[in-house]
Image (cartoon, helix red, strand yellow):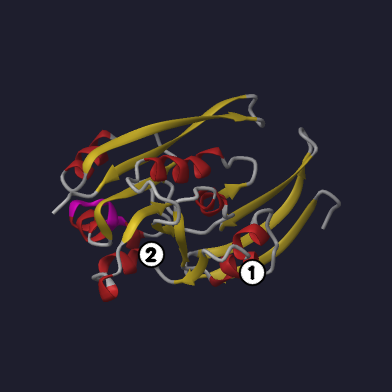
Amino acid sequence: MSARFEELDWQQTAMGDLSLRRRVEPSLGVEVFEVKLGDEYLMSSLFTVAEEELAALGLAASVGEEAASLDVLVGGLGLGYTAIAALRDPRVRALTVIDTMPAVIAWHEAGLLPVSISLTTDARTSLVLDDFFALMRRPPGDGARWDAILLDVDHSPRHQLDPSHADLYTMPGLRALSRHLVDGGVFALWSDDPPDEDFLATMALVFVDPVAHIVDFANPITGGTSSNTVYVARSRVA
C-alpha cells in the first residue's frame, strides 16, 4: 500500500472479485473512493451527479405532495449517493435499499464511505440484502407496492453486470416490475449509455410517457463533459 492508495476491502463474489479502495487523485489532490468488480470500475465518488439525479428526476415525477408520503425502493446501494439524494426529499417516508452483495451493505454499516453515517443513521432507511431482479420477478408480498423504484445496478439496459439481469429490460420484465408500483408510481433507471430508442419503445409498451434525460457533468479527469442517461416513466393507472 502506498501513501496514495488503500484497499479498504476485497471479496470474492458470484459476479467476480469485488474491491473498495480509497486513493488520492493526483491531478486534483482530493480523496476518491472507487468500487471495482474484476477489472471493471463500477463507480467512483468523483462522478456522483447522475446517481443523485436518478433520485431527483425520479422523485420529481412522483405525484405525492405531502411530507412523509412516499415509500421508495432503490435497487443497488453502491457508494450510497442515490439513496442519500432520495432522503433529501421531505416527501420520502421510507427508503428501502436492496443490494445483492453483503460486502456493500457491510461497508456502509461500518461507516467506510462518505455518506455512510448519514444514510445508516436516518430512521427512514432500511438496507436489505436481496436480489433486486429476483424480487421484481416475484409478485408483491402482502400487497406492498412502492411510490417510486430507482434502479442503478447495470451499466445500461444493453450492458448488464450479470446475464440474469437481462430479462428485466424486456416487456415482460418491465411488466413484472410495474406490479411493484402503486398506480401512477415512478420507475427511474440510470444508464451509462446514450438514450436507447429501442428501450424507450419497450418502456412505452408498459409505462406512461417514458422520457430519457441526458445528465451532463464535468469530468475533472478529462477536463471535459461526460454524460449519463436517466430514464423516467410512470406506471399506468388501473
Q: Nearer the viewer, residue 164 or 137?
A: 137
> Is residue 78 rendered to the left or right of residue 116?
left
Q: Secondary structure at mark 2?
A: helix
Q: Is residue 170 magenta?
A: yes
Labelled disc at residue 109: 1
Tell me which corner region of the image, top left, top right, bottom left or bottom right, holds residue 106. Answer: bottom right
Q: Secondary structure at mark 1?
A: helix
Q: Position of residue 193 (x, y in %)?
A: 41, 37
Residue drawn at x 72%, y 62% is 8
Residue type, label 2: Phe
Residue drawn at x 70%, y 62% is 112
Does 134 sit above or below residue 189?
below
Which of the two discs, 2 and 1, labels the residue nearer the N terminus? Answer: 1
Residue 195 is at least partly visible in this image: no
Q: Nearer the viewer, residue 201 or 150?
A: 150
Q: Nearer the viewer, residue 175 or 9?
A: 175
> Is residue 123 rendered to the left or right of residue 179?
right
Residue drawn at x 64%, y 58% is 118
Q: Position of residue 87 (x, y in %)?
A: 53, 53
The secondary structure making up most of the magenta span is helix
Q: Which residues are magenta?
A: 166-171
Residue type, label 1: Glu
Quarter of the rendering occupied by the C terminus? bottom left
Q: Position of residue 32 (x, y in %)?
A: 71, 46
Q: Nearer the viewer, mark 2 or mark 1?
A: 1
Does 156 sit above or below residue 129?
above
Residue 71 is at least partly visible in this image: yes
Label 2 and label 1: CA atoms lie apart by 20 Å
> Is residue 168 rendered to the left or right of residue 90?
left
**Disc 2, disc 1: CB below 8 Å?**
no
